[in-house]
Amino acid sequence: MYKTVFSLTTIPSRIDNLWMTLHSLFNQTFRPDRIIVNVPHKSTRFNTEYIIPDFLQHMHNIGNIEIHRCDDYGPGTKLLGLFSHPNIDNDTVIFVFDDDRVYNADITEKLLTAYTDNNSNVSVGSVSGMLEKHQYNYYAFYFMGFSGYLTCKKFFTDDIFECTKLNIRYADDHYLSYHILKNNYRIFGLEDINIHNNTYAPRMSDNEFIDSLRSIEHVDLNDKNLIKECDKYYKEKYNFDIEEYKKSLENI
């Protein structure tokens, strides 16, 4: 079993530029057991099969990365695609990344330090818009996936896959975060993304401008409506009220 992995996914139109993100992961000050790219057989969103570029296949062949073929769960494939991997168990520490960012070399070290400092029992990620009295290092109600986050399979139950069948599959930061919280685990926030000169935030890669979720024009799939739908789903299905949870953070 792998103890630590870096995990990400991509879409067919972005896979050729994935080397930019991978290069930044190769340069991390913390090195995992494995870097895994979850590649579905076919993209549901684009109804297109994936073509593995030569550079990625070569990296796989020489052991720099591992290509893991899996089902397509939308943006959440960067994490959920990994759950079918035979060498991932409940305690594997999973660092999750987007395919359109170039990450600072110490991001994984920061995430891991926060994880171990909290008894290895929290998810860790960058957060935004939290309580004003907290500026650094506090519990939060969701993580911002583009900045990278750390989590484990043990924080999830199999019903997480129900979310991938709904529109909220495109709000992966929220439905994944809410699932962790409703299972009575916490999310530990690092630096707030809104704080001036935040060295935690990654830079954009060329993939930022290729078929981003923000380019989807359907009214039901804009960010605000998806978040509202996600809030409603968790309240009705699990009696988990995100607004009440936010209030509870004031007492921490």
Image (cartoon, grey):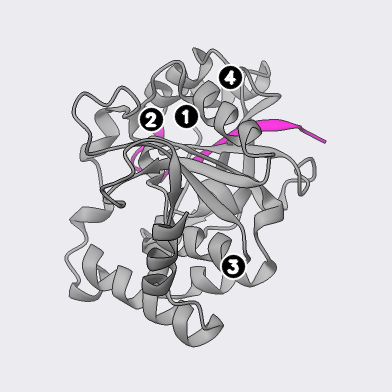
- As rendered, which of 143 and 24 lies closer to the eye? 143
Secondary structure of the residue carrying tag 4 is helix
Q: Which mark is first along the chain, 1 or 4? A: 1
- As rendered, which of 102 and 177 lies closer to the eye? 177
Q: Which mark is first along the chain, 1 or 2? A: 2
Please name the amino acid that badge 1 sits on: Pro
Instruction: Say whether residue 138 is visible.
Output: yes
Give the residue pinned by disc 4: 58
Give the residue pinned by disc 1: 53
Q: Is residue 230 left or right of residue 121?
A: left
User: Is there CB contact under 8 Å for labels 2 and 1?
Assistant: yes
The quadrant of the picture occupied by the N terminus is: top right
Q: CA distance from mark 3 to mark 4?
A: 33 Å
Give the residue pinned by disc 3: 160
Which of discs 1 and 3 lies nearer the camera? The answer is 3
At horizontal 38% and vertical 81% (from top left) the residue drawn is 232
Q: Which mark is first along the chain, 3 or 1? A: 1
Is 3 colored magenta in this rendering? yes
User: Is there CB contact under 8 Å for labels 2 and 3?
Assistant: no
User: Is there CB contact under 8 Å for labels 4 and 1?
Assistant: no
Q: Residue furthest bottom?
A: 236
Is 243 colored magenta in this rendering? no
Q: CA distance from mark 4 to mark 2?
A: 13 Å
Image location (x, y in percent) of residue 22: 47, 23
Please name the amino acid that badge 4 sits on: His
Secondary structure of the residue carrying tag 1 is loop
Which of discs 2 and 3 lies nearer the camera? The answer is 3
Q: Which mark is first along the chain, 2 or 4? A: 2
At horizontal 38% and vertical 64% (from top left) the residue drawn is 246
